[in-house]
Amino acid sequence: DAKTTQPNSMESNEEEPVHLPCNHSTISGTDYIHWYRQLPSQGPEYVIHGLTSNVNNRMASLAIAEDRKSSTLILHRATLRDAAVYYCILRGHNAGGTSYGKLTFGQGTILTVHP
Amino acid sequence: ETGVTQTPRHLVMGMTNKKSLKCEQHLGHNAMYWYKQSAKKPLELMFVYSLEERVENNSVPSRFSPECPNSSHLFLHLHTLQPEDSALYLCASSQEFPGSGEKLFFGSGTQLSVL
C-alpha cells in the first residue's frame, strides 16, 4: 500500500486558517486521497476526499498537487472543536476493482487550536 | 451520530473469558470492517466483510473470530485474549462500488481491557 507522510503536530489559533500538508509520492493513478479526523474517545470522522481536482465541502477544502504527490487539507477558520488527530490516507483498490475500505492509517497530525 | 453503533462502549475481561463485541449500521451499506487501535499506534485493519462474505483477514490471531449474520450486523467474538489485546476496537461501514473511493463511517468504538 502506498504510504503518506504528515507532520507529527501543528498548532493554530482560533479563527485562523490551518493548512495541513501530506506527502504521498508513491500514489498510484487510481488511489483516492482521503482525510479523516479523530477526536479523543471517538472513532475517526470523514472530512473530505478527492482524486485529482481540488474539493470543497462544508468542513474543509482539499488542494491536490498537479502531480498528485502531495495534498493539503485546509480548515478555513479553526475552532476549538477542530482540535483532533488528522489522518491523510490513500484509498487503494483490491484485485477485484473495489477497495473494500483499504484505508491504511499512519500516525496522523495532532492539531492543537489555541483560544 | 454516524449511523454506526457499537456495544458495549467499555469492556473489561479476564484472559479466560469469552465475550463478543457488537456493531450495527443503519445506513444500508454493503461493507463492514473491524479496526484495532492500540495506544500510540495507527489504526490496523483486521477484517472486511462485503455482502456478508469475509473478503479480508489481515493475519489476525484466531482468538478473534468475526461474524457477519446480515449486512447490518457485525460481531467480533473474543476468547482467551492476552493483555496486549487491550485496545480500542472500531467498527466501520461503507457503500462500495467498483472503482470508487467511498468514505467510511466509524462507530465510537469499544475500549477493551484484558486483565
Image: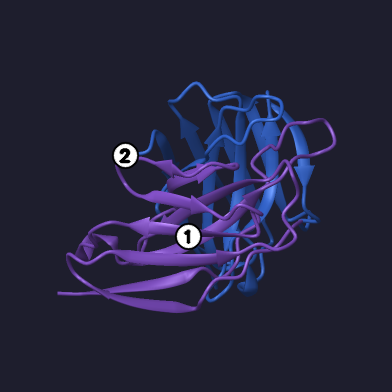
Q: Chain of mark 2?
A: B
Per the rendering, the mark at residue A72 is 1
Per the rendering, the mark at residue B1 is 2
Looking at the image, residue A101 sits to the left or right of residue A37; the answer is: right
Question: Residue furthest toward the left?
Answer: A115
Q: Amino acid at mark 2?
A: Glu
Q: Which image quadrant is residue A9 in?
A: bottom left
Chain A painted colour:
purple
Give the residue drawn at x 47%, y 30%: B25
B35, B105: nearer the viewer = B105
Per the rendering, the mark at residue A42 is none
Q: Chain of mark 1?
A: A
Whether residue A45 is visible to the viewer of this picture, yes or no, is: no
The 10 Å Cα crowd at callout 2, few under 14, some 14 to 19, many 20 or more, is few
Q: Position of residue B69 (x, y in %)?
A: 63, 25
* Element at label 1: strand
Q: Position of residue A99 (x, y in %)?
A: 70, 37
Question: Residue furthest toward the front?
Answer: A66
Chain B painted colour:
blue
Give the residue drawn at x 39%, y 49%: A61
Q: Amino acid at mark 1?
A: Thr
Whether residue B100 is visible to the viewer of this picture, yes or no, is: yes
**In the figure, A36 relative to A112: above or below?**
above
A25, A86: nearer the viewer = A25
* Element at label 2: loop
Looking at the image, residue A111 sits to the left or right of residue A72; the answer is: left
Q: Which image quadrant is residue B84 in?
A: bottom right
Q: Which image quadrant is residue A1 in?
A: bottom right
Looking at the image, residue B64 sits to the left or right of residue A39; the answer is: right
